[in-house]
Amino acid sequence: MLNTLTRGELEHLMEQQQAPCISMFLPTHPAGTVAQQDTMRLRNLIREAENLLLLRNVSQNVIEELLKPIGRFQERATYWQHPGEGLALFRSRDMFQSYLLPLGFQENVVVSDHFYLKPLFPLFTNDGQFYVLALSQNSLRLLKATHYSVQQVALPATISQSLADFLQYEERENETQSHSAASGALIGKGGRHATIFHGQGVGVDNEKDMVLRYFQQIDRGLHELLHSEKAPLVLAGVEYLFSIYHEANTYPHLLSKGITGNPDRLSIETLHAQAWTIVEPHFHEAQKSAARNFQQYATTRLASDDIKTVVLAAIYGRIETLFVALEQEINGHFDPTNSTVHVHREAKFKDDDLLDIAATQTFLHGGNVYAIDHTQIPGEKALAAIFRY
């Protein structure tokens, strides 16, 4: 089954698995001749995984069991009809996960005691995930997006599907003439729903109070979905509703700027495009600000670009912000018995990519990870870190 990668799912992939763990990355293409080549390349990665497992002295029976779901995936033509830009597969004895993502991966397979996850981190930095909450009297939509993709997210059943539905429910509960009149104006014939939005006239305070209670209901429902997220949230709706929703909101990453106008008239693709113009500067400014902070602290104990220092700091949860080179690897391993990091010029058997360890541990401890080209890293080294203390 293909899944959308969320922060929670990435954290799940970081959990300790029963080794060995297989991580596969493959660039994919639209349906056609080139797409058919993708299946052949995946078959080659399966063979490479088999060889790596044999080097680890994994028995043939276990190898066959591990590779079976990947082989079935490769044979199912329906998986390749509408691919993203990259395919990521993760297999351990406990789980199998597959993701078609808007990232053009380099072809790679890694067998280790844990999953190799560094190629996924760009989804959570400047081209990372964001949400759009489209509010109107007729409908409520939550969109999950990245720079290159967008999809509608199912809302919890605890949230009324429209403002009109919620107000009707309120009126039935209150059984007051004034609320019935307000609802009649809201859901009257001809699609006219001006009463709730004009912000003036009889009953405005009552109307605003009902809208606020509805938005508080939405906020509680979104907490079920977004409580572990750090992704920006963009509102789309008529301007009158923005200040009310901000009053109800408890999600700390709601942006002050939104998409104004009736979102019912906009497709999810249009909402996505307009929202990206809002979040793109937000993503890049955060990275620029972090880079400035590194330069400010570079000569102090609050920052480092030394691989051993940074890996240890990541493991012990000291990193606030990490820049890590997406296209590079540093071979070595962490020895937990004496808390030392060993770096090797050439890869040795069972070595890890220390950059992957630094990124994963920083992420797990709530730090910010920028997996980018090394030329964008302060000092243009393989990594740079700002410490919490």
Image (cartoon, rainbow, N blue to C red):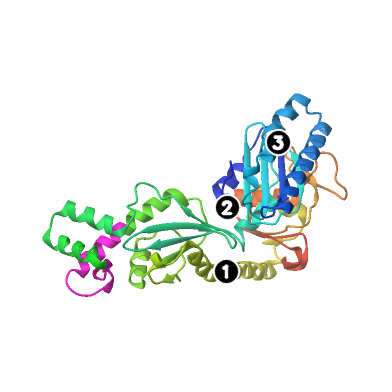
Tell me where residue 181 sits by quadrant. Answer: bottom left
Residue 105 location, x and y as percent? Answer: 71, 54
Q: Magenta segment range?
A: 191-214
Q: Secondary structure at mark 2?
A: loop
Q: Tell which tag, 2 or 3, sits nearer the viewer.
A: 3
* Above-or-below relation of 226 to 194: above
Residue 261 location, x and y as percent? Answer: 39, 72
**Residue drawn at (41%, 50%), measured in percent from left and top?**
155
Residue at the far front: name it.
Answer: 32
The residue carrying mark 1 is 280
The residue carrying mark 2 is 366
**Residue drawn at (65%, 54%), measured in percent from left and top?**
121
- Rounded to the nearest angstrom, the CA distance separating label 1 from label 2 is 22 Å
Binning the other alpha carbons within 10 Å of mark 2 as few (below 14), some (14 to 19) or many (20 upward) gives some
Residue 134 location, x and y as percent? Answer: 41, 62
Tell me the quadrant of the picture where the N terminus can be found. Answer: top right
Q: Secondary structure at mark 1?
A: helix
Taking the magenta stretch, the answer to whether it contains residue 201 is: yes
Residue 74 seen by the camera = yes
Taking the magenta stretch, the answer to whether it contains residue 81 is: no
The residue carrying mark 3 is 71
Q: Tell which tag, 1 or 2, sits nearer the viewer.
A: 1
Q: From the viewer's perspective, is 273 left or right of 220?
A: right
Q: How many numbered tags mark residues here?
A: 3
- Rounded to the nearest angstrom, the CA distance separating label 1 from label 3 is 38 Å
- Disc 1 residue type (three-letter): Glu
